[in-house]
Image: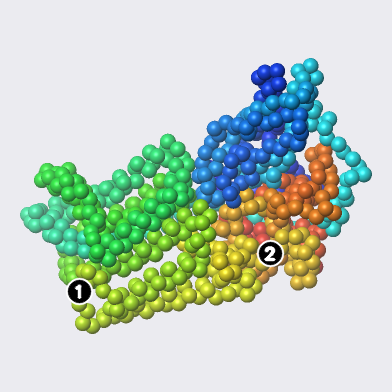
Amino acid sequence: MTRFLVLVLLFLLGPNQGYTQIYDPVVWDTDVVVLSENEYELQAIARIEEGWHLYSQNVPKDGPIPTHFIFETSTDYELLGVFEEEAGKVVNDPVFKLRITYFEGKTIFKQRIRLSKKLDTIKASVEFMVCDDERCLPPNEVDLVFNLNPSSRKSATEEVAAATIESESNMAMDGQLYGMQPDEIKIAASNCGNQMSLSAQKEKGAKNSLWQIFGLGFLGGLLALLTPCVFPMIPLTVSFFTKSAENNKGKGIQNALIYGFFILSVYLLLSVPFHLLDSVNPDILNEISTNVWLNVIFFIVFVAFSFSFFGFYELTLPSRWTNQTTKGESTRGLVGIFFMALTLALVSFSCTGPILGSLLAGSLTSDGGAWQLTMGMAGFGLALGMPFALFAMFPKLMDSLPKSGGWLNTTKVILGFLELALAIKFLSNADLVDHWELLKIEPFLILWIIIFTGLGLYLLGKIKFPHDSPISKLSWPRWTGAFLIFAFVLYLVSGFRINKDAKTFTSLTLLSGLAPPAGYSYLYPNKCPNNLNCFKDLQEGIEHAKKVNKPILLDFTGYACVNCRKMEEHVWPKPKIKKYLEQDYVLISLYVDDKKVLSKEEQIEVQRSNGGSRKLKNYGHKWAHFQTQFFKTNAQPYYVLLSPDGKTILSKAVGYTPDEDAYAAFLSCGLLTMESVK
């Protein structure tokens, strides 16, 4: 599913305000094809507004709400098979991390049926969910009437209207359901609000993301320099350029600069195929990164990389590749220098390959796709090529370089431990994607504790690997490194501390995006996002807010809402936002797709905002009706700031707001207004 990097929706709330809207982007129609005297093909036709999409009947577990057709139980006809649907568009959703099919524009569902007696009409209903790039609507249910008698056939709209019974005696008062009436909610005067523009957010987010990836690539290149495959090449290569141009020092420096540039170019060229894939299918990188089996393959590959770094075997590219590039070095001029750079890239693969693999995997799992990979490769190539040019310009600096020795192998082994930890991360991704529920937070932390404890013991000389040199005395870098590693191990152990308020383990900020959520636990599972305290019942939340005298953050959300999850996983954990949610607001999360059945007393018929009536059967129906009736909108996510009694709106409501500063301004505005209405 294509998602914009930044989308901000501002809504003004209340009965007479123009920014609220009830969305109804799907129109259903029916048709009937006669196959034989007693067999028919029933067609349910969905016409979907541009920009919206309707989900398939077949959606994986824990995904969006699928389209579902329900027929009245009858002995008068027999359904032959199931509803057939068109191919639709298949994507790997980056938030749900599932392969999902949906439809756009117009689609037709077909069901064959055989009659056992003559009928004029067959009644059914369809439950469905639609989303666009900004919002998801709560599940909706529409009646369908299939006319088998051509002479009496009417439009579906007329049939549905005729079938709708609006009984005033069965209409429930909203006060009975929610403890208040829509006209009781007032809007407080406020002169604050979210002033950030959409373009500014997009520019800021894109630039930050690309430069962060560039920085990580540069760091990876510096690490590659410290490996035994690359470090010894620096003085050898620089000496070659300076000696080959003894009579023209400037020429030697020029060739070294070109050599460094070609090293950068080689790694940039590695990202070109991903741009070609991205142009053919913009979703291909997301499809690759969210594939469960690819994450398993990454796990296996990174384990193989780590044992290679440990020295148990060596990973090399085919010798004929390096033989061909070595032949090219004999060519004079720029072509020969380019082949020298290419040869360096190939012969150093056993050391640089695992680091490049980490960079590749990390870039594919981010939203920027091929351009982020290019920036990462640029950082890596620049860090790797820069020393060759620098030392050629200032040869005396090489005197300060440490001599090659056992420390180079130590660097490789350290990288091996890091690769092993990263392998666990990819196995965790596969576990979350495919819902194995095996690698929850407890085993993940235990495995990382074992890996980094092993690294600390290695630095202290307690663990040996095949190519390690004898250690007569521990150097200060080893003592310092061991101290830092064991401090990190203690930090990992602190992840088992119990957060008494959230009743789960303490979330570790440094592991955000690496470890499973703290609430994904065997011992202390947590049902609220990010270990926050939240209420899932309106009245219960209001009573608590009045008791503690704190304003309410009313969160209209959904289990199957993509952008709701983005907000909960990427915005709410930000320190600037989290302190508001933990200290200043009472969070009430109302799930509009909650299938938990209401008590019989609450299963009442209510009037729809856009006409007709509906029987509330589950909590999703109840909260969706509350949102449309009281706030005149049915999109999620949707955030409303209310006074403790729930009857005063404190600020403009917002929808999907991924910018941290904009969302913080929204929450701050509510607190300022709260002070003025006390």
Quarter of the view holding residue 405: bottom left
Q: Where in the figure is residue 579, as x and y percent of width and height?
A: 62, 68
Instruction: Look at the image and tell me whether residue 260 can be seen.
Output: no
Check the picture and name the quadrant holding the C terminus.
Answer: bottom right
Q: At label 2, which amino acid type do we have?
A: Cys
Q: Nearer the viewer, residue 240 or 272?
A: 272
In the orientation shown, which residue stands out farthest toward the left?
Answer: 247
Residue pictured at 81% horizontal, 63% vertical:
645
Q: Is residue 579 above or below residue 5?
A: below
**Residue 390 locus on image (x, y percent):** 22, 60
Q: Quadrant of residue 110?
A: top right
N-term-proximal mark, 1 vs 2: 1
Residue with the mark numbered 1: 469
User: Where is residue 113 drawn, in percent x and y?
Assistant: 68, 27
Is 615 on the left-hand or right-hand side of 282?
Answer: right
Residue located at (23% from left, 59% from top): 314
Secondary structure under the numbered disc 1 in the rendered image: loop
Is any atom of residue 34 visible in this view?
yes
